[in-house]
Image (cartoon, grey):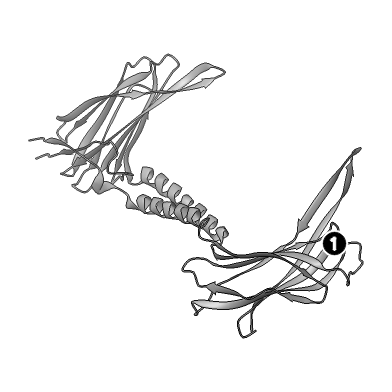
Amino acid sequence: MSVSVQSSNSSRFVDHSLNISSLALLLMMIAGIGSLFFPQQVTNQMVKVLPEETTQLSPITIERRLVGALRIDVKAIIPTNHWVVYEIRLYDDQNELLASAIKEAWKESGVWREDGETGTWSESDLLGGLDVRLAEKKREDITIAVAVLEYGETRGQVITDQPVSFRVDVDNGVIDGRYLWVGFFGVLFMVILNRLSVTTTGKVRIRKTIKDSDVGERAIVGGENSLIRVTVNVKSDETSPQSLAVNLWLKDGTGEQIYSEQTRIKLNFRRDDGEIEDATGKLEQYFVFTRRGSYGFYVEVTPDQPVDETTLIVTENAKTQSGNKPVKIITVDAD
């Protein structure tokens, strides 16, 4: 029997779904930041409109943008405890109606009393708007009109002789951020799922826990295209040092040792009211056995006095998150 041990990297065992979803998340972030700079202000002006009348703004020329739409925001400016129903209309250069929207705007305030306490409240819903895109023409002259359909006070009185003021803001190249946020959180959820799936990918061949410092077990694993992940979880008591030594060795089907290594792992201490309760540590190693067969995996943790529990997990067909991360893949040739 001849044994050769070589160090390599995990590039051919990377789960690329995580990289793809992470790239998509980055693109969503870039799109979100870029959407703040895409809009170009076309006009910003105030108009007054009498009830049951329509006021048209001066025609404006719009150029079709590769990204984003034309956004028309109209905000009613009315006194407290008033309401207004208004319509936004958009006409082309032939005075044909392209789009319209009706908004029921209101503004209210009052006084509240509860358990001897009093205060004031104020609520309003005044903003209406349209988002449109030019279908075929690269440039188009459009006209925006605002019509007041009804106007009155919340106590019931209808007003017919007082104009309503509106602020009209028109921007071109606006991206609807609501869809970006939905996409962002959707992709973020996929990134989290992919990251979790990478750590659980593969078939567990050994999972053995013992209330001691040494554990071992055999399994049939291997193959040139199968990455073996060996995980050692250690739980120790409050007397633990800052780190422990994990001795890992492997044996072939005949029981002959083919690999051994000692690695120190740092412990994470759990405290309660300033007192150390226990500590945990973890070791991960990666292997490739070029010939499939029966292999033994054995672990001993030293010093063993503070060790309460040792768990050995061997997973076949594992994946890694990155080919550049400092993981060790050792190829063992067994004749």
- Give coordinates of residue 8: x percent, y percent: 19, 39
Q: In the rendered view, does 52 fall on the left or right side of 145?
A: right
The N terminus lies in quadrant: top left
User: Relative to 13, is 127 above or below?
Assistant: below
Please tell me which residue lies in front, 335 or 178. 178
Identify which residue is drawn at 36% across, 14% down. Answer: 305
Q: Amino acid at mark 1?
A: His
- Give coordinates of residue 29: x percent, y percent: 47, 52
Question: In this view of the protein, can residue 6 be seen by the observer?
Answer: yes
Please tell me which residue lies in front, 78 or 243. 78
Identify which residue is drawn at 84% across, 69% down. Answer: 151
User: Relative to 217, is 187 above or below?
Assistant: below
Q: In the rendered view, does 244 fall on the left or right side of 335?
A: right
Identify which residue is drawn at 92% across, 67% down. Answer: 157
Please tell me which residue lies in front, 71 or 248. 71
What is the crowding at mark 1: few (fewer than 14 residues within 10 Å), some, or many (at least 20)?
many
Identify residue for label 1.
82
User: Which residue sits furthest left?
Assistant: 1
Q: In the rendered view, does 53 fall on the left or right side of 245?
A: right
Identify which residue is drawn at 27% across, 41% down. Answer: 324
Please tell me which residue lies in front, 71 or 156. 71
Question: In this view of the protein, can residue 169 be seen by the observer?
Answer: no
Q: In the rendered view, does 96 fall on the left or right side of 283?
A: right
* Residue 230: quarter of image: top left
The C terminus lies in quadrant: top left
- Give coordinates of residue 250: x percent, y percent: 21, 31
User: Relative to 50, is 249 above or below?
Assistant: above
- Give coordinates of residue 242: x percent, y percent: 38, 18
